[in-house]
Image (cartoon, rainbow, N blue to C red):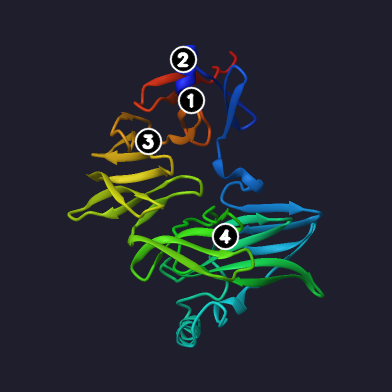
């Protein structure tokens, strides 16, 4: 029995509280925590990444990649990756070298697309973008202590490019001993993977390339977006086992907070809505709201970085529970 069905059977609604930067949802002995900043895993905060293990720290921020003993971090250069035959063909390397010389491309990575802890080590998926912000390379790397400090070692790359955005994202996953990520590759959308050493590269195509995707291992569908003509956006779900597609929605506007469980923040005619993509049910929300799927339903809060209110919604976007911050003392 699902948690929502169990709650209905018991006639109980979860309590929603905010403690130490995270919402806590609880009913009986069942509880779930939702950080206000969902990317806090491994100390990720405010668009930067930080990971510490056995006295070694790895940081990625606007200054690039740094690593070393805690309190003695050093810059880790990845210039050699940009023109390495491990990641590009000879023709691609010649093109890249020429574009780096013209300052169209940078030899150092622009962003961190994802990260995964494998055993006691860390695998990074690094992204290179050109001067216009268009990705042209993603590469997998690990870090090891060398004679002159921490050194990055290339593991290889996925077929195609992923959908990560911003300075730091979390679009690298582990599944059944492999590293996986959704990508577009040669005009096709699919799930790319390698083994944990960067070998045995595979790509499982699922259809024509897409503009955006929300997916993670363990879920049977991926939710994808594509331009649908005349300024419209089409949203579909893709069965990741058999590759079948189901069109869910086409509309004119913007989409944000596309969640792999089938929720999204739709902006239509300038108005934001929390929408269940499976049922089409939606409800108006604040423009500065954030949202996260939970075992109890969809949690929506606003403002996103300093919440004053929160609402827990069921599959039909009806309120199950609410929370409001206490007024300041007079």
Looking at the image, which residue sits at the far front? 242
In the image, residue 167 lies at what x, y percent? 53, 57
Please indicate whether residue 68 sits to the left or right of residue 323 in the image.
right
| Distance between the alpha carbons at the discs numbered 2 and 3 | 34 Å
Q: Are marks 2 and 1 in contact (CB under 8 Å)?
A: yes
Q: Nearer the viewer, mark 2 or mark 3?
A: 2
Mark 1 or mark 3, which has the lower sequence index?
1
In the image, residue 245 lies at what x, y percent? 30, 51
Q: Where does label 2 land, which residue?
A: 9
- For mark 4, give the secondary structure: strand
| Distance between the alpha carbons at the discs numbered 1 and 3 | 35 Å
| Distance between the alpha carbons at the discs numbered 2 and 1 | 10 Å
Mark 2 or mark 3, which has the lower sequence index?
2
Q: Do the residues labelled 4 and 1 touch (CB within 8 Å)?
A: no
Q: Where does label 1 land, which residue?
A: 1
Q: Are marks 2 and 3 in contact (CB under 8 Å)?
A: no
Picture quadrant of residue 168: bottom right
In the image, residue 76 lies at what x, y percent? 69, 69
In the image, residue 106 lies at what x, y percent? 52, 74
Residue at image position (45%, 85%) is 95
């Amino acid at each position: 029995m699902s948690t929502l069905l169990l709650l209905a059977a018991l006639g109980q609604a979860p309590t929603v509280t905010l403690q130490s930067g995270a919402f806590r949802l609880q009913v009986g002995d069942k509880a779930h925590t939702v950080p206000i900043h969902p990317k806090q895993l491994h100390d990720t905060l405010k668009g930067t990444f930080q990971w510490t293990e056995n006295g070694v720290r790895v940081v990625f921020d606007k200054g690039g990649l740094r690593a070393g003993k805690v309190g003695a971090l050093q810059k880790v250069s990845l210039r050699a990756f940009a023109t390495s035959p491990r990641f590009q063909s000879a023709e691609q390397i010649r093109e890249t070298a020429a574009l780096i010389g013209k300052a169209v491309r940078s030899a150092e990575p622009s962003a961190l697309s994802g990260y995964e802890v494998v055993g006691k080590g860390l695998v990074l998926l690094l992204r290179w973008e050109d001067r216009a912000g268009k990705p042209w390379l993603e590469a997998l790397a690990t870090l090891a202590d060398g004679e002159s400090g921490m050194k990055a070692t290339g593991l290889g790359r996925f077929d195609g490019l992923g959908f990560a955005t911003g300075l730091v994202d979390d679009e690298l996953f582990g599944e059944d001993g492999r590293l996986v990520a959704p990508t577009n590759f040669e005009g096709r959308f699919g799930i790319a993977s390698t083994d944990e050493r960067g070998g045995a590269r595979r790509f499982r195509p699922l259809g024509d390339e897409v503009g955006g995707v929300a997916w993670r291992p363990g879920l049977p569908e991926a939710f994808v977006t594509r331009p649908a003509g005349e300024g419209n956006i089409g949203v579909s779900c893709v069965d990741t086992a058999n590759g079948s597609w189901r069109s869910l929605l086409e509309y004119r506007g913007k989409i944000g907070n596309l969640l792999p469980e089938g929720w999204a923040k739709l902006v239509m005619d300038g108005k934001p809505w929390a929408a269940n993509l499976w049922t089409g049910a939606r409800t108006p929300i604040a423009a500065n709201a954030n949202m996260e799927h939970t075992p109890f339903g969809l949690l929506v809060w606003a403002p996103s970085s300093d919440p004053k209110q929160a609402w827990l919604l069921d599959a039909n976007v009806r309120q199950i529970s609410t929370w409001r911050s206490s007024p300041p003392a007079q």
